């Protein structure tokens, strides 16, 4: 979490010999983002490579899609369920 994404990414790249790819960024209140970050670190512990770096894979992509639906619901159609009638 950072207030200056560009500065943070630059520092990460300078301190890491490996290529660093940012898959997605999200903006929100500090408390909410910190809470989500802690939940994700626990949920994705098996995907952790080192420090705050994670191996890309299906679990990471699924978490990113779930977060994208939270932060940008307008990009997703409403879910259709048995309780929700189809609209013409």
Image: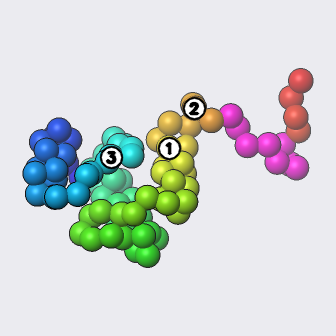
Q: In this view, does 76 lie above or below 45?
A: above
Quadrant where the C terminus sits is top right
Q: Which residue is drawn at 27% across and 51% down?
A: 20
Identify the mark nearer the N-term, 3 or 2. 3
As rendered, which of 72 and 8 lies closer to the eye? Answer: 8
Circle 2 is placed at which residue position?
75
Residue 68 is marked as 1
Q: Which residue is drawn at 57% across and 32% down?
A: 75
Numbered disc 3: secondary structure:
loop
* Left or right of residue 35: residue 71: right
Which quadrant would residue 53 be assigned to in this image?
A: bottom left
* Left or right of residue 83: residue 74: left
Label 1: few (<14), some or many (≥20) within 10 Å?
A: some
Residue range corresponding to the magenta coloring: 77-84
Circle 3 is placed at which residue position?
22
As rendered, which of 35 and 67 lies closer to the eye? Answer: 67
């Amino acid at each position: 979490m950072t207030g200056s994404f560009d500065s943070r990414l630059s520092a990460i790249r300078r301190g890491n010999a490996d290529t660093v790819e940012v898959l997605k960024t999200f903006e929100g209140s500090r408390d909410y983002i910190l809470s989500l970050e802690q939940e994700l670190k626990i949920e994705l512990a098996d995907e952790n490579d080192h420090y705050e770096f994670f191996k890309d894979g299906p679990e990471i992509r699924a978490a990113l899609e779930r977060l994208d639906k939270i932060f940008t619901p307008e990009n997703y159609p409403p879910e259709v369920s048995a309780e929700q009638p189809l609209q013409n």
